[in-house]
């Protein structure tokens, strides 16, 4: 499944997936849409998996500047149920790791 780094034009789709992640896993302290926008525009990034239409999943890389200029953490790895078991999570992580 194709994976690409999100651009500002992808903000709505990225936010939809992050919010779905929050709901699915009962996240108590949630990001807001502005955090998703910062993730897209910042030095980390958001990656989306999909082959047209609604994206199948996402993953976020957030910098951890307190730990050094090259430190970061993986956040919000999520694959929609209809796409689970098809290697989407691995493709998302491969793209994120290639960037990192």
Image: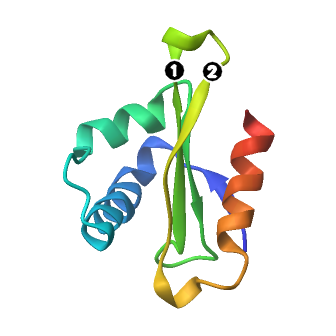
The residue lying toward the viewer, choosing from 69 and 6, is 69
Residue 78's place in the image compared with 39, above or below, is: below
Q: Identify residue for label 1.
A: 64
Q: Residue at x 49, y 10 (%)?
A: 66
The residue lying toward the viewer, choosing from 64 and 53, is 64
Estimate the spatial distance between the alpha carbons at disc 1 and disc 2, rounded to whole Å. Answer: 5 Å
SS assignment at label 2 = loop
Residue most extreme to the bottom: 82
- Residue 99: image quadrant is top right
Image side of residue 25 versus residue 86, left or right: left
Q: How is the image coloured?
A: rainbow
Q: Position of residue 42 (x, y in %)?
A: 48, 26
Residue 98's place in the image compared with 63, above or below, is: below
Q: Position of residue 76 (x, y in %)?
A: 45, 53
The residue lying toward the viewer, choosing from 8 and 80, is 80
Q: Residue at x 67, y 59 (%)?
A: 92
- Quadrant of the frame with the N terminus: bottom right
Crowdedness of circle 1 by 10 Å Cα count: few (<14), some, many (20+)?
Answer: few
Crowdedness of circle 2 by 10 Å Cα count: few (<14), some, many (20+)?
Answer: few
Image side of residue 84 versus residue 28, left or right: right
Circles 1 and 2: CB atoms closer than 8 Å: yes
Q: Residue at x 52, y 60 (%)?
A: 58
Residue 40's place in the image compared with 71, above or below, is: below
SS assignment at label 1 = loop
Mark number displayed over residue 71: 2
């Amino acid at each position: 499944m194709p994976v690409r780094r999100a651009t500002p034009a992808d903000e709505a789709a990225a936010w939809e997936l992050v919010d779905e992640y929050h709901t699915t896993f009962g996240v108590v302290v949630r990001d807001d849409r502005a955090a998703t926008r910062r993730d897209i525009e910042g030095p980390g990034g958001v990656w989306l998996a999909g082959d047209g239409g609604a994206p199948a999943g996402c993953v976020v890389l957030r910098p951890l500047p307190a730990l050094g200029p090259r430190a970061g953490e993986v956040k919000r790895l999520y694959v929609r149920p209809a796409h689970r078991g098809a290697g989407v999570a691995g493709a998302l992580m491969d793209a994120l790791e290639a960037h990192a």
